[in-house]
Amino acid sequence: MTVEGPSGGNGTGKVGEILAVGSRAPGSGRVQLDVPAKPGEPTLRWRSRVHTIPEIEQELARIWAEPNLETMVEGEPGRHVAARTSVMNLVVVARRPEVGERCAATIQLLTGRHPSRTMIVSAADPDGPSWLDAQIQAHCVLPRDDAPEICAELIYLTVGGESGRHLGAIVAPLLIHDLPVTVWWPDEPPFGRPQVLELLSNADRLVVDGSGWSEDGLKRLRKLAGLLDTTTLSIRDFALVRQSRWREAIASIFDMPEFLPYLTSIRRIAVTYGTHDESGTPGSTNVVKPVYHVAWLASRLGMRVHKPLALAEDGPRRHAGSSAHSGMSRGLTATLANGRSEVAVVVRPVHSEMPSGTTLRVELKAERRGSELRADVTAEKESVHVRVWLDGVEELDRGFLAPRRTDVDLLAEAIESGGRDPIADDALRMAAALVGPDGADDEPRPQAASIGASA
Amino acid sequence: MTAPTKPRTRSRPEAQPDAIPQPAPRAKDVPRTMKDLRIAREGRRKAAGRTLENPLREGLRLERVPDPCVLVLFGSTGDLAHRKVVPALYQLWRTNLLPHEFVLLGIGRRPFDDESFRKELRGALEKYSRVLPLDEPAWRTFKDRICYQKLDFDDDAAYESLSGRLDELDHDRGTRGNRLYYLATQPSAFSEIVGQLGRVGLDHEVHGGGWRRVIIEKPFGHDLESAHRLNKEVGRVFRESQVYRIDHYLGKETVRNLLVFRFANGIFEPIWNRRHIDHIQITVAESIGVENRGAFYEETGASRDFLQNHLLQLMSLVAMEPPATFAADPLRDEKLKVLRAIAEKSRSEVAQDVVRGQYGSGWVAGEPVKGYREEPEVDPQSETETFIAARLFVDDWRWSDVPFYLRTGKRLPKRATEIAVQFKEVPHKLFRESATDPDPNLLAIRIQPDEGIMLRFGAKIPGLGIDVRSVTMDFTYGSTFAVDSPDAYETLILDALLGDASLFTRADEVEQAWGIVDPIIDAWADAPAPEFPNYDAGSWGPDAADELLGRDGRRWRRI
């Protein structure tokens, strides 16, 4: 077995050495902890590095078969490192090392609650020879002072050359069988490539963040929706899940009996989002989140897409999903059909210091029996604000304390969810319908590209 | 929802949503008296105005939110209100689960005004809120919804004022005539309060167009006769569907999960019967003594305080048949069938199958503690039991001859509530040569603490031989789900606000449970004085409790 020492850390680098945090007790092979583990704080308990799949498998077996995993605390035999606890496999496809590190930090915060075998996979040097580098770690966490430790494995897999185009084949043998497989793809998944489908064929859930995709993100959103029909994957998009506080606030308007009838008479939905781009360069800002707002409302209210999103009037009339649309600063419009009535949709940018693509306002207009209801929902970091007018007279002005959710919250929710979420699926399908029919093949497909490789 | 609502700038008539067809009333709901007929018709008219549901709620945390309402808290200056009810309401408010148009109207004899009452509740929350420090923005908006009304429970005029105050709140705060009366008072005040509410018409659901519900805390009566009398008194004012008798154990996450565990998993129900189960143990252990409730406890004892409600409710959930739907009445019908299938014990059976105990002094959690008879407000010669263990049988097809061992007590070594389902041994021991004899399978459902479920089974010890050892699969709520479980009171109050009575006990359930407990208490009354104290504080009860199982060749599970 080819062996290298870990890059950095406290150990000398032999395979299987228990590094933990602290120094090694003389002659015992055990590690004396400088500071006893604290409940809730994950600690590194094992680190090694190998270069083939069989070596990874051997190392994973060795971690838990190691008889000497008892740690020393203040010179006395301490807590025994618990047997591996895994409730799922988590595969993270990270294009850049810093993305992988960020994801690992998020995952470690969930070790106590969702211990999993995690593989952070990235491809490198696509034109070079094939190679594999695996850094294997075990992190343990004490759920409580008096509870056994919960430990989980983390494997950084970097794959070079031709192997990088077959990540599915690298990952498959390392999955713990019978446990669900979640693929978290924090970057830009190149949906449609056979290699991606190969990797996803092993998975039960796919977790993405559409709000981080390049350009307006809508082409990729359409392809994501396509997976609902071609796979059995349960799909969670952080961009959609994050909006739950908006949805709660919007729904609360129509909890009021006097406003509820207006819900079937909505005539206009306008979503305003922030952009840093004052020039209005086409596709400069990701609009996945604002489009999801429209899609969720439309899908819940049983609307259909009459005319998909296109540049607002005065601009060239092209589908938002096409590659060359311009005039973003004027926003996008679409038309929905609500029974026999039409619903105007406007998705418009305004210059803002908020992160680009952030929804700033959702406005609804409904008309019923000669009366007009207008609702205006805005959000800040810790709260959402709702105002409603009937025939121009303010009827409601209320705030919700609803802080933005962190990636840890979102990942925990994605992990805890079971199968497909019909509400999310409906919203995603409606978003794809709003984007419009697929145009030209807009996904660059250089033959040599690796799906997890650095851009 | 936290920011205050601006006053409406004008009032508008309520738009009438389109109605959806209502199910036909079942035979048992058919009105029998003119009053029933009137209420039923008014109920139908009211229902027709609020049937359209909000489609945007689908998939959100709550698919239905409580209607705007006033929660009228009787006993609002008392211990229960401070420790449980108000912290639960604050938590519901903090997590946006209460309606924006919500008012907590505290009722009590003490001379608070709104502002001083808010300060009082703030102090209680700082002590008892399960999430500390307090969320200041949430508190600011919550406190704006707290009001106080001084009221002596037997003062007729005060209820007229209360009625006026509630009308004012409806007008000013948009609470729409919906009221939840919460009786967190001494049980002796229940009848008076309910009667007075009825006298001034505060029970009428048509009055102002809102719903009226009442939550009644346990103990609901102190024997069958008193429970029956109280049910009649409450029933003279409120319909059964308006009454929510609270047993907070039913709101605990693990108790609710018991239903999910049994009826959402296919693998357990086929073995949930006399063929596979040897016996079941239900333990509700408390490490505390009677605290400052000596006088109360002298009148209740473990049988009335725990056996009649918590233990028998847990037992009925374990033993019940699957209900046809997860709705209040089908669920409660099935629980009632279990209680009806528990035979009343004769005096000789009580002597054989029921053990009572009272703690003497001892050590709990490393601290010396007094015996029960030395506690404040307790008779030095008290015969009140602080421990009870019983062997009960459910005489039906599923459970015939399967003993249910129930025990509860104070000053036991630890606080723990658990249901242990002990399965039968394998019919044929294949691994006789094994060095260790594995225990039969066991399923332990931990209600508190460490909420979760443990399954014990045999596994081969690694090595060349075939040695078998018991191992466990453990599920713990705290380490599996990223969200904290709500407190039982949060669950139950929210359910009552939503009109869901599934987790509340019905009048006939309460009476049936008293029908099981009364013969035990009667038998004790006729028996010679017990030799109390008969167990040391910090032990697992009297020796007789161990003998109760020992006679059957069994023993209590070590918890």
Image (tube, coloured by chain):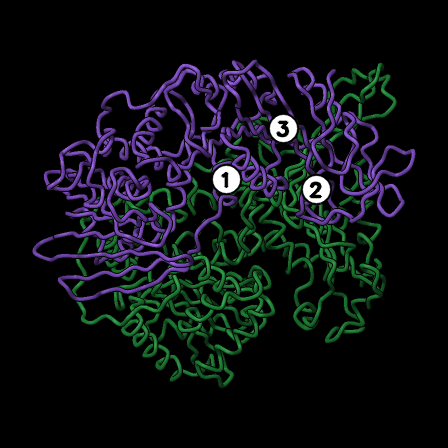
Q: Position of residue A384 (x, y in %)?
A: 35, 57
- Using the image, tell me which numbered label, if any, was put on residue A337: none
Which chain is green in the picture? B
How many numbered badges does the structure rendering display?
3
- Using the image, tell me which numbered label, if any, was put on residue A411: 1
Q: Nearer the viewer, residue A178 or A7?
A: A7
| Disc 3: CA contacts within 10 A as few (<14), some (14-19) or many (>=20) | many
Q: Chain of mark 2?
A: A
- Using the image, tell me which numbered label, if any, was put on residue A155: 3
Asked which quadrant contains residue B281, the reply is top right
> The C terminus of chain B appears in which quarter of the rendering?
top right
Q: Chain of mark 3?
A: A
Q: Which residue is mark 2?
A: A43
Which badge, 2 or 3, is on the more N-terminal residue? 2
Q: Residue furthest right?
A: A27
Amino acid residing under circle 2: Thr
Q: Nearer the viewer, residue A286 or B541?
A: A286
Q: Nearer the viewer, mark 1 or mark 3?
A: 3
Q: Are marks 1 and 3 on the same chain?
A: yes
Which chain is purple in the picture? A
In the image, is A389 to the left or to the right of A132? left
Q: Position of residue B332 (x, y in %)?
A: 48, 46
